[in-house]
Image (cartoon, rainbow, N blue to C red):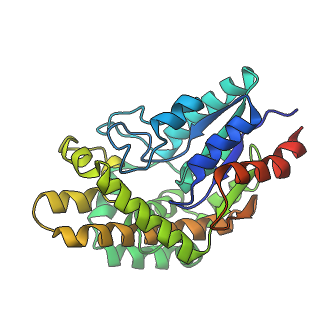
């Protein structure tokens, strides 16, 4: 029986956390490793739909709610922490289940940290200060192919990719080619029909607000780390709490931003040809999906 990590992925709202717990219980000896840029922070459990206390009591979880929201964190740091945890889990004879929605965090864990040039604070500040349209234009001029494969609606991706091209002197495709090796383990992607996922997102948004997201955000420090500050829905709730957004706009605004984020995640996931898509019907439950994953992947690994 080969002990390699299993990657359970999917867009936000797809139910991957519950499926990971069900799979861990099905395997018997398994532990879950988070690969999410926001669930790693304490005090954001409701807003990030982190695993519940009940789920975390059933199966050991790692890299969930372990950092202060004021602490800087990035994909490379997270991957190094995760890889150490994965190695320790395997050494203890258990199966690591990696799950999360942050593409770069997942990729660094599954395929290793890209040797792309590290961020340069001075250049990053200069590029961030540019008008966004100017940053997009510069990326398109410096690397047309790379720009075509970049989410040009996301300032963070645009600035980072432009930074890589300028610092490295090579197109993004050069650095991406370093990820052509085999992944650390097999992976699946939960696939819902878009209307079904949209409905799940709307229900989850309403549930978050009903179960304390407003109080959670109100209790956060005013100054957060750059990553924590980007938590989906956080700025919207802060606008509401400050009187800049009416309550009637709260759910629609957060749900729309979440659907847009899920769409970007689906685009990224479709490009990851090492993942096996697992269609999810509206009636499927976590245990049934875990059984499918067990049959598809774990038996192949044994």
Tally of numbered discs = 0
Q: Residue at x 34, y 44 (%)?
A: 44
**Does 169 appear above or below 195?**
above
The image shows residue 66 at horizontal and vertical percentages of 42, 31
Side of 171 where 181 appears, left or right: right
Question: In the image as oriented, which residue stretches furthest toward the top?
Answer: 92
The answer to whether residue 181 of the structure is visible from this angle is no
The image shows residue 157 at horizontal and vertical percentages of 45, 64
Using the rendered view, name the quadrant where residue 205 is placed. bottom left
**Does 178 appear above or below 56?**
below
Quadrant assignment for the N terminus? top right
The answer to whether residue 140 of the structure is visible from this angle is yes
21 vs 228, nearest the viewer: 21
The image shows residue 300 at horizontal and vertical percentages of 89, 46
Question: In the image as oriented, which residue stretches furthest toward the front?
Answer: 283
220 vs 19, nearest the viewer: 19
Q: Residue at x 69, y 62 (%)?
A: 272
158 vs 251, nearest the viewer: 251
Side of 160 where 2 appears, left or right: right
The image shows residue 270 at horizontal and vertical percentages of 66, 69
Side of 208 where 261 appears, left or right: right
Quadrant assignment for the C terminus? top right
Q: Residue at x 54, y 62 (%)?
A: 169
């Amino acid at each position: 029986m080969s002990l390699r990590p299993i990657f359970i992925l999917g867009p936000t709202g797809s139910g991957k956390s519950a499926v990971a717990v069900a799979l861990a219980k099905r395997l018997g000896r398994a532990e879950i490793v988070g690969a999410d840029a926001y669930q790693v922070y304490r005090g954001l459990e409701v807003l990030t739909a982190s695993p519940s206390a009940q789920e975390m009591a059933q199966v050991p979880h790692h890299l969930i709610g372990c950092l202060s929201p004021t602490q800087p964190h990035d994909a490379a740091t997270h991957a190094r922490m995760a890889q150490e945890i994965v190695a320790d889990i395997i050494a203890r004879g258990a199966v690591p289940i990696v799950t999360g929605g942050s593409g770069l965090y997942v990729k660094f864990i599954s395929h290793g940290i890209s040797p792309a040039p590290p961020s340069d604070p001075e250049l990053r500040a200069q590029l961030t200060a540019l008008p966004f349209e100017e940053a997009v234009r510069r990326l398109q001029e410096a690397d047309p192919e790379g720009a075509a494969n970049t989410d040009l609606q996301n300032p963070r991706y645009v600035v980072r990719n432009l930074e890589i091209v300028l610092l490295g002197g090579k197109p993004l495709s050069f650095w991406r080619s370093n990820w052509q090796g085999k992944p650390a383990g097999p992976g699946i992607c939960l696939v819902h029909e878009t209307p079904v996922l949209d409905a799940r997102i709307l229900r989850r948004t309403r549930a978050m607000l009903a179960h304390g997201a407003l109080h959670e955000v109100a209790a956060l420090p005013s100054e957060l780390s750059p990553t924590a500050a980007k938590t989906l829905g956080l700025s919207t709730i802060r606008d509401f709490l400050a009187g800049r957004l009416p309550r009637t706009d709260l759910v629609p605004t957060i749900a729309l931003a979440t659907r847009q984020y899920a769409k970007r995640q689906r685009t990224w996931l479709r490009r990851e040809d090492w993942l096996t898509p697992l269609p999810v019907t509206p009636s499927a439950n976590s245990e049934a999906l875990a059984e499918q994953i067990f049959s598809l992947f774990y038996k192949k690994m044994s």
